[in-house]
Image (cartoon, rainbow, N blue to C red):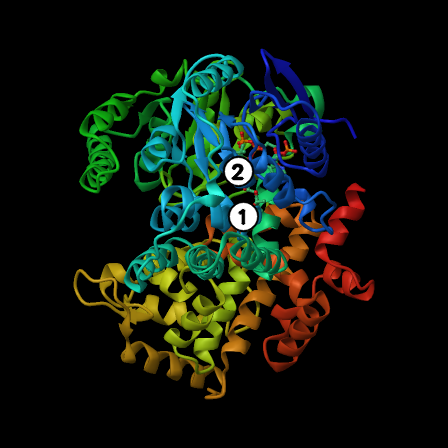
Amino acid sequence: MANPVSLAIDDGIAVITVDSPPVNAISVAMRRGLSAALSLLADGPVPRGVVLLCAGRTFMAGADISEFDSVLVPPDLRQVLWEFESLACPTVVVLHGTALGGGVEVALAAHYRIAERHTKIGFPEITLGIVPGAVGTQRLPRLIGAEAALGLLLDGKPVSAEQALALGLVDALVDGDLRAAGIAFMQDLLAAGKGPRRTRDGVVEPLSEAQIGVLRSKSARQHRGVITAELDIQAVRAAWELPFEQGAAVERVLSEGSLLSPESKALRHLFFAERAVSPVPAMGPSAVARRVGRIGIIGSGTMGGGIAMAFANAGIAVVLLDVDQAALDRGLAMVRKNYALSVKRGRLTALAVEQRMALISPTTQYADLAQVDLVIEAVFENLALKQQIFVQLDQVCRPGAVLATNTSTLDINLIAAVTGRPQDVIGLHFFSPANVMRLLEIVRTDTTADDVVATAFELAKRIGKIGVLSRVCFGFIGNRMMDPYAREAERLVLEGASPAQVDGALEAFGMAMGILAVFDLAGIDVGVKVRQANPQQNSPDPTFYRCDAVLYEQGWLGQKTGKGYYRYDAGSRERGVHAEAENLMAAEAARLGVAQRTNITEREITERCLFAMINEGARILEEGIARCPGDIDVVYTSGYGFARWRGGPMFWADQVGLDTVLAGIEKYGRQASPADWEPAPLLVRLVSEGSTFTAWQASRHG
Ligand code: T1G
């Protein structure tokens, strides 16, 4: 293991440089290197001062997360930092890039801190379900006060260098050569006769319960269902209730416990799954992204308008095409209205809105798409119409332009086939509202070229989205797995559960919104029309989506009509009981011979919905629609409101045990609708091998 830490003496000042690309994560090698450097300094002649900085694009971005699953190898960072803080000469840390988590804890143990002007500084541990573990919860409140400290820990987002300066987290901002700036700062300290200034010697003013309450409720809104916030509060409380070393011992227990929690395992799984979504590195030299300067969008409805905003927000020019001026005017008015809302909420300035609107050029002429580098078709779901559009695109777009469709159900192979350049055709499935939702399904056809896939992934990153690769099938990854999940939710209503009971169980599990409430929000007609247009996808079971059908027949289309699974007062999104609908659905159950039960439990609801979803996930994996279980988890947590602290459906299935999932599938299949409960062959096989989705994935790559 190469030593990433080097030590040099410059004019009597010791300079410790850490160099461990890509992000200087604090690994065992780094802890060893730091410890060795500190021993040299402690044992040898005392330098006048110590400067610590990092090479590369950033200061330490925290502890090495990949080491968290194994027993931590000594030396312990806490001990290293104790020694660092104990040095007899003054010490300064120079921050740059993204100084995060354990990296900031290193800085807190220095006597002084300076930061390059563009540095971001923060504690993202809460997003990983971890309490900081290198005594940050004790030093930070001593440095900046308990309220500001808890604010940073519970928020999880980094602050700017200027904010850090205002908080007293850093002492000065610097520019240019970091090493020179560190040495200059140290020389000024020495000239002014300043010596060591140990954070651990500070005192902490206690917070009132009311102050804690405010921080707690803010965090609860931000990190729903996550227990780490409460643990952070306990740790910081120890900072004012106990002496430093005892407080550090409290933090240690809380931090080590948090590492073992299911919540943290799930969040760490997602950290790596989100960084592994791109298939491009494995594709080799054929996958160099094409250059994309300007893009075209066809259709200025809700979807097209939202997509246009997503690009304009990233500073990318858009040509927005619709059939006539009236449609364009409506579309642009909607975009403007959405931006106005952001201005009202203080998220955007009026000037920024004008700059973004100026990036969107409306047109009714296909000829105006001649010079764009990528086009996204976002008209309504009709194969013939989309094919006709692609024929036109083939005629007007320049050679090498990427031609994308935002379809959510259609066979993109059939769209690609009408062009003379099927290798340039790809699916870019955005989620509504497209300017907000993070997920982008990138759908590769049988003929899409590698560099077109690479272009899509690069573009996703540029507009702040997380791209996940899917192959072509009905509904791709997300909607295809959603279908059996929703099928069970609404079948449970047919069997006697109330919509509130079904949604309540799903929300208690951790879904952002119960699926029946989602249907009301999206419009009951949307799903009904998709099923009417694709009868081959429907289950032969007579109870299949009958509740939706009942609502549709009555014209109860959800929020837009004030009635659906729930009843809504005018202008309100609050769900009320829609007794009339529940009665009609009970009558439908009677007609179908489905006995309504009063003994449906929360457990049955979550198991039926989630096990059905996981079963479909197993099929999707086996068919190669999704590359890996982690990709499915990213789709669900970033596009479908699946609780991050559950890790996504496939990770959750592994935690529950695939044998339990399979036993449930078999049990519910015996209970009713056996045609819909056929276990996926992959699931059966993994259970027979005592395996998991994670192990299956590892075996394919190991
Ligand atoms: N550990 C291990 N690997 C990491 C890592 C980390 N902390 N941070 C990044 N990587 C890898 C990442 O997997 C990817 O690898 C590559 O670096 C580039 O990352 C003791 C308990 C720093 C803002 O949570 O937020 O400190 O895919 O693609 O967009 O109390 O990475 O190339 O193989 O994301 O420029 C707290 C997590 C840890 C920071 C850079 N720290 N990292 O973003 O690049 S807990 C974090 C980030 C802790 C202490 C506790 C971002 C970034 P590969 P990237 P990027």
The N terminus lies in quadrant: top right
Whether 681 is drawn above or below 61: the answer is below
Residue 561 in percent (x, y) is at: 23, 62
Q: Nearer the viewer, residue 14 or 402?
A: 14
The C terminus lies in quadrant: top right
Residue 664 in percent (x, y) is at: 65, 74
Element under disc 1: loop
Q: Which mark is residue 135?
A: 1
Whether 487 is drawn above or below 161: the answer is below
Disc 2 versus disc 1: distance between alpha carbons?
9 Å
The residue that appears at 23% across and 67% down in the rendered structure is: 568
**Are dots 2 and 1 in contact, CB under 8 Å?**
yes
User: Quadrant for ligand 1?
Assistant: top right
Q: Is residue 82 visible?
A: yes
Q: Nearer the viewer, residue 278 or 627?
A: 278
The residue that appears at 69% across and 34% down in the rendered structure is: 35
Q: Nearer the viewer, residue 463 or 385?
A: 463
The answer to whether mark 2 is within 8 Å of ligand 1 is: no
The residue that appears at 21% across and 28% down in the rendered structure is: 325
Tell me which corner region of the image, top left, top right, bottom left or bottom right, holds residue 32.
top right
Residue 524 in percent (x, y) is at: 35, 61
Q: Which mark is residue 109?
A: 2
Give neighbour class at mark 1: few <14, some 14-19, many 20+ (Cα, 10 Å): many
Q: Amino acid at mark 1?
A: Val
Q: Is residue 422 visible?
A: no
Q: Amino acid at mark 2?
A: Ala
Element under disc 2: loop
